[in-house]
Amino acid sequence: MPEVVFPLDSRKRFTEQPIVGHNRWHPDVPAQVRVRPGDVFRVDCREWFDGAIRNDDSADDILNAPLASVHVLSGPIHVEGVEPGDLLIVDILDVGPIPQEDSGPLAGQGWGYTGVFATRNGGGFLTEQFPDAYKVIWDFRGGVATSRHVPHVSFTGIVHPGLMGTAPSAELLRTWNAREQALIDTDPQRVPALALPPNPDSAILGNLSGAEFDRVAAEGARTAPPRENGGNQDIKNLTKGSRVFYPVFVDGAKLSMGDLHFSQGDGEITFCGAIEMGGFMDVHVDVIKGGMAKYGVSENAIFMPGRTDPQYSEWLAFSGTSVTLDGEQRYLDSHLSYQRACLHAIDYLQQFGYSDIQAYMILGAAPIEGRLSGVVDIPNSCSTVYLPTEIFGFDVRPGKDGPTTIDPGQGVPVARA
Amino acid sequence: MPEVVFPLDSRKRFTEQPIVGHNRWHPDVPAQVRVRPGDVFRVDCREWFDGAIRNDDSADDILNAPLASVHVLSGPIHVEGVEPGDLLIVDILDVGPIPQEDSGPLAGQGWGYTGVFATRNGGGFLTEQFPDAYKVIWDFRGGVATSRHVPHVSFTGIVHPGLMGTAPSAELLRTWNAREQALIDTDPQRVPALALPPNPDSAILGNLSGAEFDRVAAEGARTAPPRENGGNQDIKNLTKGSRVFYPVFVDGAKLSMGDLHFSQGDGEITFCGAIEMGGFMDVHVDVIKGGMAKYGVSENAIFMPGRTDPQYSEWLAFSGTSVTLDGEQRYLDSHLSYQRACLHAIDYLQQFGYSDIQAYMILGAAPIEGRLSGVVDIPNSCSTVYLPTEIFGFDVRPGKDGPTTIDPGQGVPVARA
Amino acid sequence: MPEVVFPLDSRKRFTEQPIVGHNRWHPDVPAQVRVRPGDVFRVDCREWFDGAIRNDDSADDILNAPLASVHVLSGPIHVEGVEPGDLLIVDILDVGPIPQEDSGPLAGQGWGYTGVFATRNGGGFLTEQFPDAYKVIWDFRGGVATSRHVPHVSFTGIVHPGLMGTAPSAELLRTWNAREQALIDTDPQRVPALALPPNPDSAILGNLSGAEFDRVAAEGARTAPPRENGGNQDIKNLTKGSRVFYPVFVDGAKLSMGDLHFSQGDGEITFCGAIEMGGFMDVHVDVIKGGMAKYGVSENAIFMPGRTDPQYSEWLAFSGTSVTLDGEQRYLDSHLSYQRACLHAIDYLQQFGYSDIQAYMILGAAPIEGRLSGVVDIPNSCSTVYLPTEIFGFDVRPGKDGPTTIDPGQGVPVARA
Amino acid sequence: MPEVVFPLDSRKRFTEQPIVGHNRWHPDVPAQVRVRPGDVFRVDCREWFDGAIRNDDSADDILNAPLASVHVLSGPIHVEGVEPGDLLIVDILDVGPIPQEDSGPLAGQGWGYTGVFATRNGGGFLTEQFPDAYKVIWDFRGGVATSRHVPHVSFTGIVHPGLMGTAPSAELLRTWNAREQALIDTDPQRVPALALPPNPDSAILGNLSGAEFDRVAAEGARTAPPRENGGNQDIKNLTKGSRVFYPVFVDGAKLSMGDLHFSQGDGEITFCGAIEMGGFMDVHVDVIKGGMAKYGVSENAIFMPGRTDPQYSEWLAFSGTSVTLDGEQRYLDSHLSYQRACLHAIDYLQQFGYSDIQAYMILGAAPIEGRLSGVVDIPNSCSTVYLPTEIFGFDVRPGKDGPTTIDPGQGVPVARA
């Protein structure tokens, strides 16, 4: 095993570990871990709610999830000799659930969860259709996920970190806070919120304390959105074998990671989202000196995916256009057209006996593909969502005899908002 | 060869053929071709500008393209016994350039083109960066495309129809026209336009004439956008072997098709767009009676892609978020985040010696993948674009030595708007 | 369409064409076609029995097939400037059935056949189990094959030439004839024969005549076996997009090709074999001067397969070892272990209702994979055969409920030897 | 982590563990582990020589390897209620190197080895060309293997067990011993041997002792060859996610496993062979009652491979026919034709600067594909070997400029026999 530079004990809370991570982006969160270019090391990662979500049949924990406390991140890790303007190479040598712990109360110990937040907590991609809180538990057996809440479906995991990134510079952080506040200011009372401003409540900032803690907590950017530093990109193809190149904004890069997913569909449409778990990452780091200018990468990670993503050869695809459910025509809105494609898939799966929320959960957790198929044909964008037909335990393809009917089982736990 | 139910003579204009197709959607365009469920037949398709674009080194033809005349479609084809509420099955048995004609003045005769419209003509996905008209000619040799205007790149075609669909009902047509006019009315003078209203100029409506022609021409929807009937979806994966299920809104379904592409990246970001060509489609049709209700497919096609799409195993991917180039934060705008990802790819390719428009053309024409990676992490959407590294004749991956420099050759013809 | 340098009229016999090909390997068969390195051209190919096999339900034509007349090859084609010691590059730009002729009496006109020879005619891979003559007709619809003789199975074609090669030098031809005669001499009366010596009967030698015809006919090697020049390699992965490098033994290389297959399993185990058809090949040729020494390729083609082979992701595999059905242990005999693996697959498929010969025909025609899995574990070789499960119209995987039962239909025509 | 039913302590020898496995096949080796159908459990596996091969630059340990002691197998495992005639389902949930131990003296602790035996010890597939003992050390970093002995090559592991199987019945064991002795008797002095008879020397038989040990040791079959029970099949595609169905010959099935490989080319042509390592397997077992008759599987495993094998899309392939290097024609000898294809690949790679043994080692260890391409074209079989071009750190494809030259580095350790 590579040296564990950032260990986590499953029996202890995130803030009780020997090295405490962080849940805000700020250049002044101290790096308690130092590595060198060329090093290989292991980082343990806690699931993003630090154990608040349980393996049971109630969605109350999702409804009352401690949103101010996310994402608990492992890091920052200082990579010696790396400077602003460099590209940090991160090879994902391995990523998986918590090793050697196949049962336990912590997501990642042989199980994970997919949740949908209530609208007041941010909702999900389809929050108008699904305004409450929902939860699905998935069991891992080897590389495959199944669920008592969504029967007749099983799929090979496409394990990846939802979140990884370098620290912003002070200037970049100010830019983030300014532009996001400007957006919030356009509709401050909106539910769900347009964006989340810095929030000292529940901030975790490594070993900072006192006035410095208060300053950084007041300024630190929330971790939900992906930004110039990578961050919560939720790219399902950042699997084992991937090489990622991050822009560097501070000395030592200050790399952090977390929010591991056992599997996820493109878009992580259920928001909480993917199959959430804790686990580990084995990482190799290196540097391209001056790489940002050399390759014109001033922001956002670039990457080369691995070679062992699960292979499926049969797909059933749904398309959507940028017309709202109420019939309003929007102009080239690919976000909307993807929503419509997903809603079409949900309509379809319901004909087989699934509830709407079961279908939604499948789209969030299974390795579905979401593509921007047409983005120029005014006024309609066209997006498509591809479901691997082989993940279903029945024939999900359209035929002359109409759909077969499956037993949806106990269904998805819900907590009314 | 299957019976050619809709033949086209390459030496004659689209309107001089024995059977004349159409370029507007309307239920009352007469079906001059009739087939039965179970039939296999061939349909010739003309490139969408009916030969106005030439195999030369000038972009003047793109600048002055006859936009009112598009898309020239082959159809409508009446499928006997098919009724509203059914799902029409269309198997794409084969699709390719004009058979047996590997040289000639018509796109599809051994060559195709990718164009970018000037902003006043609709522009493309990145019209702010590329406001003029541009053209690239691609030569086909077997299944592979290369271009004198974009050297050092070659890729296997992912041949597909950009446009296929059934006729709208009169009611559905009224809905389209109303909602699109409502959008136009929000900013009628916008350049580029928000949408295109019905336009009798250059309308082609099969064998209609007289007052009926005038009525239908005044009402017929333009063919640019994809809509409930399928239409101009520009889905690059509708390749040979695909099975598509279209909702049916009129008796006989009235199937039409055209706008063939030799290859295209997800999104068809260059607008005109893909590698445009004429050619043929071999099609098998069948029906699922009452399929729309049986499977919950009230609108938009669903489909199962074929098995022989070109296989690439190495990819270089770029990510983008929904922040404008001016630094303005937008709320979960996947269209914008895909633009930013594409711009990042263009920035990157320029470091190797390509001009910006050459890089843009590669993204439009090559089989790149565009994915909605994160759609819930407020306020930033995350989109990704994947380039197959093996299409480049040099090592396009980032490395410590920096990018190699290629000779960009004569470059891309441009016509200033 | 590329220039057709070797045309074939489907209504005329192979020997009645304007350019007559050949069915023996000999350096002195004249090249009636000349091309240059860099040229792209089309070659029509006749099915290997020149139309003797019919689209009907009798296997008599297989039983009485004119074996002395095979393979009818298109060529030789002289490539200018190519000399012994060079590597001839052949790009397979396209390959397919007879264009534009989807029905007719000639295999390749919308249909093809798979035959098994009677033992006295050479038999097949499993001739002890299947000593008679059998025939299956496959219909092509787009890229997919189905058969009235083997119901419930359909698969995407993996179209390729069974046979392509350069001419041997006189010295190489002598080597062939000598070593094959030496093998025959070890058991001259064996049925099936160990090898086939030169046979003037039914020889076709281009435009040769008179004494020169007689001399070449007496010396010319039969085309059945693959040899140093490539030849009848029956490599199912030489599909569209493949690049092949042939050693050159005579001036101009004298390239010939034929024996097209719509599909074939690894090994072409049914011998006649694959799904046989006529059709066309679009080819680009080039040369690596002195390539044989440069790359150490003194014999046998090397190649890079194309990118569009049919993709399957679910397989059911069978293994075999080198023990005979009678229980005799053989030493590392991979030929035997592959036979045993194939017999296991046949045993298995019979449990679903197929006859043994139906199962055998599936293995010969469908894109199955045959692998040399273990070749060193004395005394047993281990070979494996992989069946794509998705080609079956029923669930072919093992389960607790046992196999489902299909209706095998009319079955496979047989002609008792 | 699943319960470890068969644990191994890396610091102790195989025979000093709490549960001792075995290295001979015999129905009377006691099962010290019992599981139930439906159970999931972990089995630790020791590398096949129990640590005799070291991570150094000498091949002396390969030359003097303790051949009588192989393979050290974990098991037998008794599966309750499973009886002769059943099919035992074994799902390979996971398989990998020794967890959490990335450095140490035991193969599997972050490294593995590929060896070639001297001819007197059995040699390898190409023992005539490589009569001595050779060794290559491979380092694992994440999922990728590289070697100081074979530079410029790296590849994603295709991890699998080389050996897994059920126990033979007493009758089946007698059959094995009889038929293999009959083979040996045809040439008892042959070097390498035709087969290996039972050998009490170094036999390990679980907790057997005394007279019973002596009896079983005298009768137990060696583990080298694959046989009716599965055994040492060396199928490189038995990767994570695979489901295997074993015939059952004794009560409880008595499942055993071992000989893990980090990677291997088809055939394991180097014999010792693959990249050998110790590690673990997570396994789920189940049963199809009466499955052998239900599915016609009387012998040899059938299996469905997993979905996450490494994906490569560019291949360079070599072909061979059944003519010996001395020019002797053999009759349809697929073993020979695969040898010739491999020798051609070795000839080719040497032109780039590799030594012959380096090239041979690449073929043995990398995920190359070996196919039985033509098995019926008398007298020549045609086999092909496919190398993924992307495993090389240089352009390995043929081109007009000839091969580039690499630095072969220190080369492969050899020990003269």
Image (cartoon, coloured by chain):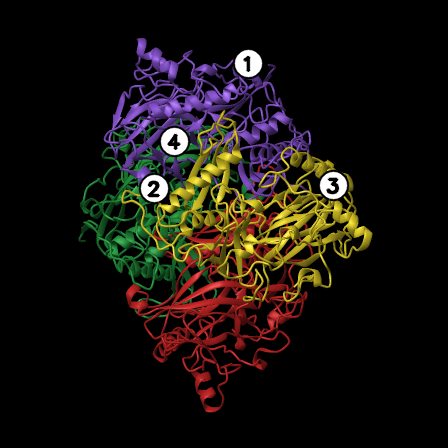
Chain colours: A green, B red, C yellow, D purple
First-in-chain label (2 vs 4): 4
Q: Residues within 10 Å of mark 4 (few under 14, many from 20)?
A: many
Q: Image quadrant of residue A65?
A: top left
Tell me residue B140's x, y (percent): 62, 59
| D43 sits left or right of C245 in the view | left
Chain ID, mark 2:
D
Q: How far is the residue under mark 1 from the one under mark 2? A: 48 Å
The reply to whether the C-beta atoms of the residues labelled 2 and 4 are less than 8 Å apart is: no
Task: Tell me the kind of residue under disc 1.
Answer: Asp
Helix, strand or loop at disc 4? strand
Q: Subunit of mark 4?
A: D
Q: Which residue is mark 1?
A: D60
CA distance separating discs 1 and 3? 46 Å
- Name the residue beneath numbered marker 2: D295
User: Mark 3 highlights which residue?
Assistant: C173
CB under 8 Å between discs 4 and 3 = no
Is C99 displayed left or right of C318 in the figure?
right
Q: Residue A206 placed where, x, y %? A: 33, 32
From the image, state whether disc 4 or disc 3 is nearer to you: 3
Q: Nearer the viewer, residue D127 or B188?
A: D127
Residue type of the residue flagged with mark 3? Leu
Q: Residues within 10 Å of mark 3 (few under 14, many from 20)?
A: some
Residue A407 position in % (x across, y down): 21, 53
Q: Amino acid at mark 2?
A: Tyr
- Please report the residue visible at 60 percent of the width from the left and 71 percent of the height from the top: B63
Distance (Cα) linking label 4 and label 1? 30 Å
Residue placed farthest to the bottom in the image? Answer: B211
The residue indicated by pointer 4 is: D95
The span from disc 2 to disc 3 (Cα, nearest Å) is: 49 Å
